[in-house]
Amino acid sequence: NAGVMQNPRHLVRRRGQEARLRCSPMKGHSHVYWYRQLPEEGLKFMVYLQKENIIDESGMPKERFSAEFPKEGPSILRIQQVVRGDSAAYFCASSPTEFYEQYFGPGTRLTVT
Amino acid sequence: QQQVKQSPQSLIVQKGGIPIINCAYENTAFDYFPWYQQFPGKGPALLIAIRPDVSEKKEGRFTISFNKSAKQFSLHIMDSQPGDSATYFCAASLVTSGTYKYIFGTGTRLKVLA
């Protein structure tokens, strides 16, 4: 049973470009969470999604950031017009139900030049 | 109210030592306290977790001590090994928006010397 998969593992974008981060949850998991980790800091919650629904996006910046989890395919975190401050590791986690432990993927390390 | 304060920021122990990492919280609504282990370049992996109705939980060499009245909990690693060198995060969660929302501490970078 494969774990949570994220791609790409490393992503370099120039300021103003778009970044698309993908997350495939563990088999049987329909709940997906996105977190951001800045250097030397803990993980900060961004958004919680179930299939085709955003449940809680209280940690998402109001502009440039969006997330989706379509009926088919991976969850996608999209960052438009990236800025240097968006450079961070972005982790996806999944769980089988809403009240269960979250299992993390290996992360995508975004560098904005 | 939503913060989890973790200390120390870094820790160096000799092989066989017992590193202790501490976390404190304010919000009494938190009801689940997991610890995660993260190796460089990897995602956090769940290590051990506790609920506030229990004062201690052991899994292998890892022990969580929980003090509900003080709103503190700690991770002890018995007989630490160089392979335990990693960053450890505590977290606290509460039910909100129909799910567990995790609030993470800032992490403790542990180095175990051979």
Image (spheres, coloured by chain):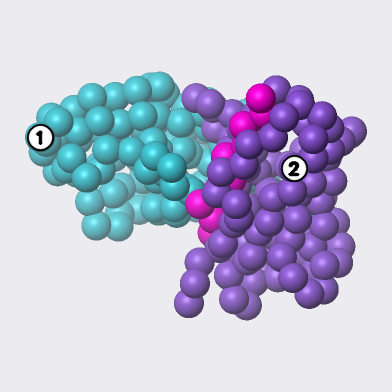
Give the residue displayed 62% in from the left and 77% down from the top: A28
Residue range corresponding to the magenta coloring: A99-113
Q: Nearer the viewer, residue A113 or B67?
A: A113
Name the residue carrying label 2. A19
Residue A33 placement, left or right of A43: right
Is residue A96 visible in the rendered image? The answer is no
Name the residue carrying label 1. B114
Chain displayed in cyan? B
Callout in the foreground (2, 1)? 2
Chain ID of residue with mark 1: B
Q: Nearer the viewer, residue B9 or B113?
A: B113
User: Where is residue B102 shown, x and y percent of the image?
Assistant: 63, 45
User: Where is residue A84 shown, x and y percent of the image?
Assistant: 70, 23
Quarter of the image that includes the C terminus of chain A: top right
Is residue B114 visible in the rendered image? The answer is yes
Give the residue displayed 44% in from the left and 47% down from the top: B42
User: Where is residue A3 shown, x and y percent of the image?
Assistant: 50, 66
Give the amino acid type for the residue marked by disc 2 in the picture.
Answer: Ala
Chain A drawn colour = purple
